[in-house]
Amino acid sequence: MMRQESSPQASGRQITLHTHQHYIPNHKDMNLSARQPLILLTAILLAAIGAGGAATAQVKVRVALDSAYIEMGRTTPLHVEVTGKIDETGGIMLPDTLWREVEVAKVGEPLVTDLGNGNKELRQEVILQAFDSGLYTLPPVLFVQDGQVTESNRPALKVMPVAIDSLSTIHDYYDAQNPP
Protein backbone atom coordinates (compact mmCIF):
# COMPACT_ATOMS: atom_id res chain seq x y z
CA MET A 1 0.00 0.00 0.00
CA MET A 2 1.44 3.37 -0.96
CA ARG A 3 0.77 6.52 1.03
CA GLN A 4 1.57 10.08 0.10
CA GLU A 5 2.73 12.59 2.65
CA SER A 6 3.48 16.23 2.10
CA SER A 7 5.87 18.34 4.10
CA PRO A 8 6.64 22.04 3.82
CA GLN A 9 10.11 23.21 2.96
CA ALA A 10 11.80 26.46 3.87
CA SER A 11 10.94 28.00 0.50
CA GLY A 12 7.25 27.44 1.11
CA ARG A 13 6.86 24.77 -1.58
CA GLN A 14 5.31 21.40 -0.78
CA ILE A 15 7.17 18.16 -1.55
CA THR A 16 5.29 14.90 -1.86
CA LEU A 17 6.99 11.88 -0.30
CA HIS A 18 6.03 8.35 -1.28
CA THR A 19 6.39 5.77 1.48
CA HIS A 20 5.61 2.08 1.37
CA GLN A 21 3.66 0.55 4.24
CA HIS A 22 2.30 -2.93 4.63
CA TYR A 23 -1.27 -3.24 5.75
CA ILE A 24 -1.63 -5.40 8.85
CA PRO A 25 -5.26 -5.99 9.75
CA ASN A 26 -6.28 -5.80 13.37
CA HIS A 27 -9.08 -7.74 15.03
CA LYS A 28 -11.61 -4.98 14.27
CA ASP A 29 -10.99 -5.28 10.52
CA MET A 30 -11.55 -9.05 10.49
CA ASN A 31 -14.98 -10.53 10.75
CA LEU A 32 -15.60 -13.66 12.83
CA SER A 33 -15.52 -16.09 9.91
CA ALA A 34 -12.11 -14.81 8.78
CA ARG A 35 -10.67 -15.19 12.31
CA GLN A 36 -11.88 -18.77 12.84
CA PRO A 37 -9.05 -20.44 10.84
CA LEU A 38 -6.51 -18.28 12.68
CA ILE A 39 -7.98 -19.25 16.06
CA LEU A 40 -8.08 -22.93 15.07
CA LEU A 41 -4.45 -22.85 13.87
CA THR A 42 -3.33 -21.19 17.10
CA ALA A 43 -5.16 -23.79 19.20
CA ILE A 44 -3.58 -26.66 17.24
CA LEU A 45 -0.07 -25.20 17.63
CA LEU A 46 -0.53 -24.67 21.36
CA ALA A 47 -1.80 -28.24 21.79
CA ALA A 48 1.17 -29.63 19.84
CA ILE A 49 3.66 -27.62 21.88
CA GLY A 50 1.98 -28.73 25.11
CA ALA A 51 2.00 -32.40 24.09
CA GLY A 52 5.67 -32.26 23.09
CA GLY A 53 6.61 -30.55 26.34
CA ALA A 54 4.73 -33.13 28.40
CA ALA A 55 6.55 -36.02 26.70
CA THR A 56 10.01 -34.55 27.25
CA ALA A 57 9.18 -33.43 30.81
CA GLN A 58 8.98 -37.10 31.87
CA VAL A 59 12.78 -37.47 31.64
CA LYS A 60 15.43 -35.18 33.14
CA VAL A 61 19.11 -35.33 32.21
CA ARG A 62 21.79 -33.77 34.39
CA VAL A 63 25.57 -33.89 34.04
CA ALA A 64 28.26 -32.82 36.49
CA LEU A 65 32.05 -32.76 36.41
CA ASP A 66 34.15 -33.96 39.35
CA SER A 67 36.42 -31.00 38.82
CA ALA A 68 35.91 -27.89 36.72
CA TYR A 69 39.72 -27.52 36.43
CA ILE A 70 42.19 -30.07 35.08
CA GLU A 71 45.76 -29.98 33.75
CA MET A 72 46.47 -30.77 30.12
CA GLY A 73 46.64 -34.53 29.58
CA ARG A 74 44.78 -35.33 32.80
CA THR A 75 41.32 -36.90 33.00
CA THR A 76 38.14 -36.04 34.88
CA PRO A 77 34.88 -37.96 35.17
CA LEU A 78 31.63 -36.53 33.80
CA HIS A 79 28.70 -37.97 35.76
CA VAL A 80 25.52 -38.43 33.70
CA GLU A 81 22.22 -38.89 35.56
CA VAL A 82 18.90 -39.55 33.82
CA THR A 83 15.71 -39.81 35.88
CA GLY A 84 12.10 -40.36 34.91
CA LYS A 85 10.06 -42.74 32.78
CA ILE A 86 12.96 -44.67 31.25
CA ASP A 87 12.51 -47.90 29.32
CA GLU A 88 14.87 -50.22 27.43
CA THR A 89 14.50 -48.22 24.19
CA GLY A 90 16.17 -45.15 25.73
CA GLY A 91 19.86 -44.41 25.61
CA ILE A 92 22.52 -41.75 25.94
CA MET A 93 24.05 -40.27 22.80
CA LEU A 94 27.59 -39.06 23.26
CA PRO A 95 30.15 -38.22 20.54
CA ASP A 96 33.80 -39.35 20.69
CA THR A 97 34.94 -35.75 20.94
CA LEU A 98 32.88 -33.29 22.98
CA TRP A 99 34.82 -30.27 21.82
CA ARG A 100 37.75 -30.02 19.46
CA GLU A 101 40.20 -30.43 22.33
CA VAL A 102 38.11 -32.43 24.84
CA GLU A 103 37.96 -36.15 24.12
CA VAL A 104 35.99 -39.03 25.56
CA ALA A 105 38.64 -41.37 26.96
CA LYS A 106 36.31 -44.02 28.41
CA VAL A 107 32.58 -44.63 28.84
CA GLY A 108 31.52 -46.61 31.89
CA GLU A 109 28.69 -49.12 32.07
CA PRO A 110 25.24 -47.66 32.78
CA LEU A 111 23.68 -48.43 36.16
CA VAL A 112 19.86 -48.43 36.22
CA THR A 113 17.95 -48.22 39.51
CA ASP A 114 14.17 -48.63 39.86
CA LEU A 115 12.72 -45.72 41.86
CA GLY A 116 9.14 -47.03 41.89
CA ASN A 117 5.97 -45.69 40.25
CA GLY A 118 7.46 -46.46 36.82
CA ASN A 119 10.40 -44.09 37.38
CA LYS A 120 13.99 -45.18 36.97
CA GLU A 121 17.38 -43.60 37.41
CA LEU A 122 20.23 -44.21 34.97
CA ARG A 123 23.76 -43.27 36.04
CA GLN A 124 26.78 -43.43 33.80
CA GLU A 125 30.32 -42.15 34.10
CA VAL A 126 32.23 -40.72 31.13
CA ILE A 127 35.96 -40.05 31.45
CA LEU A 128 37.08 -36.88 29.66
CA GLN A 129 40.63 -35.93 28.67
CA ALA A 130 42.00 -32.72 27.19
CA PHE A 131 45.33 -31.97 25.53
CA ASP A 132 44.98 -28.23 24.88
CA SER A 133 44.53 -25.51 27.47
CA GLY A 134 41.47 -23.28 27.46
CA LEU A 135 37.93 -22.89 28.76
CA TYR A 136 35.41 -25.20 27.09
CA THR A 137 31.64 -25.25 27.46
CA LEU A 138 30.74 -28.87 26.82
CA PRO A 139 27.84 -29.70 24.51
CA PRO A 140 24.76 -31.24 26.12
CA VAL A 141 24.50 -34.98 26.57
CA LEU A 142 21.44 -36.26 24.72
CA PHE A 143 19.02 -38.90 25.97
CA VAL A 144 16.91 -40.40 23.17
CA GLN A 145 13.80 -42.48 23.84
CA ASP A 146 10.81 -43.17 21.57
CA GLY A 147 11.85 -40.41 19.15
CA GLN A 148 12.02 -37.80 21.95
CA VAL A 149 15.35 -36.09 22.62
CA THR A 150 16.13 -34.58 26.02
CA GLU A 151 19.22 -32.41 26.51
CA SER A 152 21.34 -32.05 29.63
CA ASN A 153 22.88 -28.93 31.07
CA ARG A 154 26.21 -27.69 29.63
CA PRO A 155 29.05 -27.70 32.16
CA ALA A 156 32.26 -25.71 31.65
CA LEU A 157 35.71 -27.30 31.83
CA LYS A 158 38.88 -25.23 32.34
CA VAL A 159 42.03 -26.97 31.08
CA MET A 160 45.17 -25.51 32.63
CA PRO A 161 48.54 -25.58 30.84
CA VAL A 162 51.33 -27.69 32.30
CA ALA A 163 54.11 -25.66 33.90
CA ILE A 164 57.42 -26.17 32.10
CA ASP A 165 60.74 -25.27 33.69
CA SER A 166 62.74 -23.60 30.91
CA LEU A 167 65.91 -23.51 33.03
CA SER A 168 66.19 -27.27 33.44
CA THR A 169 68.63 -29.14 31.23
CA ILE A 170 67.45 -31.84 28.87
CA HIS A 171 69.52 -35.02 29.23
CA ASP A 172 69.81 -37.73 26.63
CA TYR A 173 69.40 -41.32 27.71
CA TYR A 174 71.99 -42.58 25.18
CA ASP A 175 74.92 -41.11 23.36
CA ALA A 176 74.82 -40.81 19.59
CA GLN A 177 74.96 -44.26 18.04
CA ASN A 178 76.57 -45.43 14.80
CA PRO A 179 74.19 -47.31 12.54
CA PRO A 180 75.03 -51.03 12.03
Image (cartoon, rainbow, N blue to C red):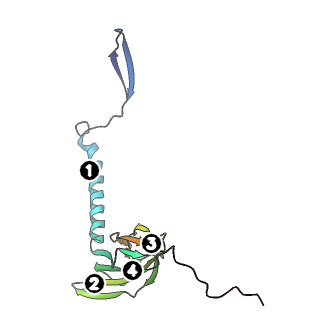
Give the mark, 4 or 2, whose residue is nearer the N terminus: 4
> Residue 78: image x %, image y %?
37, 79
| Pair 3/2: label in front | 3
Q: In which quarter of the view is residue 128 placed?
A: bottom left
| Pair 4/1: label in front | 4
Instruction: Name the kind of residue labelled 1 in the image.
Output: Ile
Give the mark, 4 or 3, whose residue is nearer the N terminus: 4
Q: In 3D space, how far apart are the residues under numbered discs 3 and 2 (Cα atoms)?
A: 40 Å
Give the mark, 2 or 1, whose residue is nearer the N terminus: 1
Q: In 3D space, how far apart are the residues under numbered discs 4 and 3 (Cα atoms)?
A: 15 Å
Q: Which residue is identified by label 2?
A: 120
Between residue 167 and residue 153, name the one nearer to us.
167
The reply to whether callout 4 and callout 3 are in contact (CB within 8 Å) is no
| Pair 1/3: label in front | 3
Q: From what the image shows, is residue 56 above or below residue 1?
A: below
Q: In 3D space, how far apart are the residues under numbered discs 2 and 1 (Cα atoms)?
A: 40 Å
Badge 3 marks a residue whose secondary structure is: loop
> Residue 73: image x %, image y %?
47, 78
Q: Which mark is residue 76?
A: 4
Relative placement, left or right, of 139 versus 165 is left
Q: Which residue is identified by label 1?
A: 39
Quadrant location of the C terminus in the rendered image: bottom right
Between residue 80 and residue 7, name the one nearer to us.
80
| Pair 2/1: label in front | 2
Instruction: Name the kind of residue labelled 2 in the image.
Output: Lys
> Residue 26: image x %, image y %?
26, 38
Give the mark, 3 or 2, whose residue is nearer the N terminus: 2
Instruction: Name the kind of residue labelled 4 in the image.
Output: Thr
